Image (cartoon, rainbow, N blue to C red):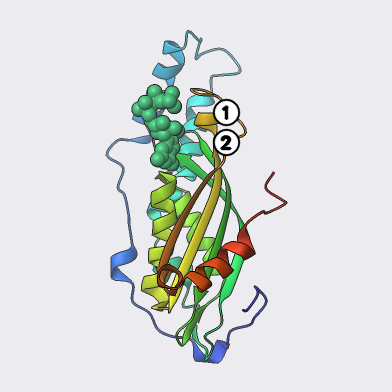
Amino acid sequence: MTLAHSKPNQVNRIDHKLPSLTTTKHPAVSEEEMRQAVRTLLLGLGEDPDREGLKDTPKRVVKALKFLTSGYNQSLEELLNGAVFHEDTNEMVLVRDIDLFSSCEHHILPILGRVHVAYIPDGKVIGLSKIARICEMYGRRLQAQERLTAQIADALQELLKPKGVAVLVEASHLCVVMRGVQKPGAWTSTSALRGEFANDAKTRQEFMSLVQHNPRLR
Ligand SMILES: Nc1nc2c(ncn2[C@@H]2O[C@H](COP(=O)(O)OP(=O)(O)OP(=O)(O)O)[C@@H](O)[C@H]2O)c(=O)[nH]1
Ligand SMILES: [Zn+2]
């Protein structure tokens, strides 16, 4: 078991090509058209989009939404910056309590929570910050929690070809909290288990016992 302090050997950087992991979306409409759409929404809500407090709101909303979905324009190759290293270890690496800020694809409302990521290396390790960056990249898209969880696991699987990967996401959806069914106490847990975590109950249990009952969450 390796906690999040181990320092991979910088000398053994591995050159990586990651063609299948890049998603770039080209907007089909202009920024001005997006602002007009927000203005229309404000009118639909019975607001006056020309009043002082709202006159710059279309511009701000478009900027905010572009930031919150900026993960579409990132690539794993770019964020990784070559930080995959040869390391002769096969002990579990766990990074837990990675803050998650995502947006639900059904309502475009926030998904707030934490991600725990573990893997069992098979000759290669990844820079620890890059695990959080991978979570950010997929988080900054319109998401379903299940898909987000699987994407993080599959990215690590493809990058490292490790013996196993486990991802647990615990999150609160503001579409469930603030509207609709209005249940602020409901948290959703989703996991994606690959390799030894899927096949070996003891390994899976070790991961689950290390990440469950997180006192910072509630
Ligand atoms: N599986 C899954 N469902 C989600 C996620 N985010 C939101 N949802 C759900 O997507 C569903 C959409 O259901 P609809 O009936 O089409 O939409 P709605 O009328 O807004 O539903 P309510 O939220 O029940 O009011 C809701 O049950 C949401 O709770 C997610 O990440 N994963
Ligand atoms: Zn939602």
The residue sitting at 51% across, 30% down in the picture is 176
Which quadrant: the C terminus?
Answer: top right
The kind of residue tagged 2 is Ala
**Label 1 beta carbon less than 8 Å to ligand 1:** no
Q: What element carries label 1?
A: loop
Q: Name the residue that disc number 1 marks.
A: 183
**Label 2 beta carbon less than 8 Å to ligand 1:** no
The kind of residue tagged 1 is Lys
Q: Which mark is residue 22?
A: none
The residue sitting at 46% across, 16% down in the picture is 42
Q: How crowded is mark 2: few (under 14 residues within 10 Å), some or many (20 or more)?
A: few
Q: Is residue 162 above or below residue 216?
A: below
Can residue 84 be seen in the rendering of this structure? no
- Could you tell whether 22 is left or right of 85 in the image? left
Whereabouts is ligand 2, in terms of quadrant? top left
The residue sitting at 64% across, 81% down in the picture is 6
Find residue 92 and report its image quarter: bottom right
Q: Name the residue that disc number 2 marks.
A: 186
